[in-house]
Structure formats: C-alpha cells, structure tokens
Amino acid sequence: MIRSAQEADKAQIMALVKSILEKEFPADASFHATDDLEKFSEVYQGPTGTFLVAQANGRIVGTLGIKAEDSRTAILRRLFVAPAHRKEGIGLGLLQEALQFCRAKGFREVVIRTSTQMSRAIELCSSLGFKEDGRWNLGSATLVRFCLRLT
C-alpha cells in the first residue's frame, strides 16, 4: 500500500532511511544527514509536494519525497526501499505514484538524484524514461542527476 506519510510515521521513516544510508555509505557520515526528514511535513507536504510511504504488514518499507524545485520542475528525494522488500515492485510503485502526482500538479519536468552505488535506483529510473543529466563527485560518492520531461 502506498500513501501519504503522516507525522506518526516519522520514527519508522527515519529508521529506514538511516539504516540504508549507513549501509550504503558506511565511511561517509555526511550522507547520513536526515534534517529534511526531521520536519518532513514542512519540507515536503503542501500544495506542490508530498512524502509517500509504502507499507507492508503494518511497517514502512519504502519512501519517496516530492517537492517543487521551481514552478515547472519537481524534485524527487529519499527514494528508499527496505532491502528485504526489494524486487517486489515497491520502488516502481512509489515512482509511478510520484509521477502521477507531478502530472496532476502541472509540473513539466521531474528530477531525481542518486549515487552510482544505488544501481537498482539507476536501473529503475532509466526504465521509466529518465535520462542522465549530469554527474559530480561528493565526498566518496559519484552523484547522478536524472531528468524526465512530462510534457
């Protein structure tokens, strides 16, 4: 089940995201920052944004935040799926729900950034038509920006 996050979900969201970041980037604590999640309702939820969660057996197993970068571009952040629930279509479901939301809000473009270490996220974005739009190094990681035109 995919739904908008509620304030009561914050602890589970934080635990999931932190556990994945610590596993994926064990030597680079700068990637472990979760300030935006501490106040996710302020950062993501509103007329042009939302924070989605995927739930299975009463637990949050996936996350994806959507917010306006500007009037025509939405940025997707915090696409994470619990390792035990990968390859179940959860990431795809979250992205499809996000793209539907973005279209309904009138965005013309969607941007998502990920790390080259997150190969499954890269494959998923590419399968949905996202095109690589740039790379840069940040600490120990190479980040990749993907863009999808909606119009």
Image (spheres, helix red, strand yellow):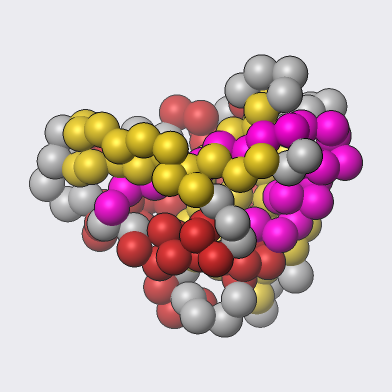
Q: How many marks?
A: 0
Q: Position of residue 139 (x, y in %)?
A: 16, 33
Image quarter where the C terminus lies is top right
Please say whether residue 16 is visible from this viewpoint: no
Q: Is residue 67 magenta?
A: no
Q: Residue furthest top?
A: 70
Taking the image as shown, residue 4 lies to the left or right of residue 94, namely: right
Image quarter where the N terminus lies is bottom right
Q: What stretch of residues is rendered in magenta?
A: 95-116
Q: Which residue is at the front of the view, 49 or 137?
A: 137
Who's the residue at 42% across and 58% down the image? Answer: 122
Who's the residue at 20% across and 34% down the image? Answer: 137
91 relative to 26, above or below: below
Who's the residue at 41% across and 73% down the image? Answer: 83
Please say whether residue 36 is visible from this viewpoint: yes
Who's the residue at 57% across and 81% down the image? Answer: 88
Q: Position of residue 145 (x, y in %)?
A: 42, 39
Taking the image as shown, residue 129 lies to the left or right of residue 51, namely: left
Q: Position of residue 46 (x, y in %)?
A: 79, 27
